[in-house]
Image (cartoon, rainbow, N blue to C red):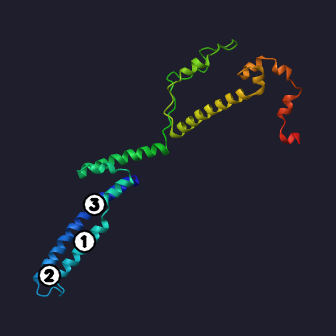
Amino acid sequence: MDDSVKELSRFKFRKKVYSVFLIVGIILVTLGIISGMVMPDPLVFGNHILLLGGGLLGVIIGFILYQDEEIFAQKFDMTHLLDITDKDERYEAYIEHLSEWISSEMREENPILMRGVDPSGPDWGKTDFKLGQKPIRRDAIAEGEKYSGMEGELTSTEIMVEGANKRYAKMAQKRWELAESNDPDMIEYGVERLGDLVKTDYFEKNAQDGIFSDTAKTDKDSN
């Protein structure tokens, strides 16, 4: 049993016991006071003192067992359920809320991983491949569409990573476009894209022997 459910059970038990101790204590104190008023000398030790002492002890124990329901509800974010006037209905609402809370917490700690299901299964190349013959080329896009919608829901971590990747891709694209627009060689040749610059004679005019070897050298090699 989860700690939150145990705490709810303890809260319900303490609330019942608190009421019993408080009511019995008040009754005993009242009886003790009445008995003392009837006696000629109330200061003499007698049954009224025992009743008064037992009643005060019951009231004290009741206050010790008392637990503020609003504080308990705030602890588990259930203050909206305090509007339910019926105690039994409110207790059932507490249980339902905690059950959903525990379930969501377990999904976060141990997310359910779903594997894609292909009812036909892999064909292992039997449908379009024969030994000694050239296999038929498969269209990757068409083949990939077969598996669309088979993935399970993304976890919270995967959603965060996907969002970060999209934001980074936009930033990288903007940086690339800015670099292209500020490139002096591209401006000189009047092109807007690096691919258009490749089509010109720029690289032929600026060719250097051994440029790839020099670029591939590390700092250690250059020293």
Residue wearing tag 3: 15
Which callout, 3 or 2, points at the residue further toward the start of the chain?
3
The x and y percentages for residue 171 are: 63, 33
Residue plotted at (25% across, 71% down): 59
Residue 14 sits in which quadrant?
bottom left
Residue 147: numbered disc: none
Which amino acid type is marked by label 3? Lys
Q: Are marks 1 and 2 in contact (CB under 8 Å)?
A: no
Residue wearing tag 1: 58
Tag 1's secondary structure? helix
Q: Is residue 163 left or right of residue 209?
A: left
Q: Nearer the viewer, mark 1 or mark 2?
A: 2
Residue 65 sits in which quadrant?
bottom left
222 to 210, vertically: above or below? below
111 to 148, vertically: above or below? below
Residue wearing tag 2: 36
Label 2: how many residues lie within 10 Å, few (<14), some (14-19) or many (20+)?
many
The x and y percentages for residue 140 are: 61, 19
62 to 112, vertically: above or below? below
Which amino acid type is marked by label 1? Gly
The x and y percentages for residue 215 are: 83, 33
Residue plotted at (12% across, 81% down): 37
Q: Marks 1 and 2, how far apart in space?
A: 19 Å
Q: Marks 3 and 2, how far apart in space?
A: 31 Å
Total marks shown come to 3
Tag 3's secondary structure? helix
Q: Is residue 31 left or right of residue 98?
A: left
Which amino acid type is marked by label 2? Gly
Label 3: how many residues lie within 10 Å, few (<14), some (14-19) or many (20+)?
some
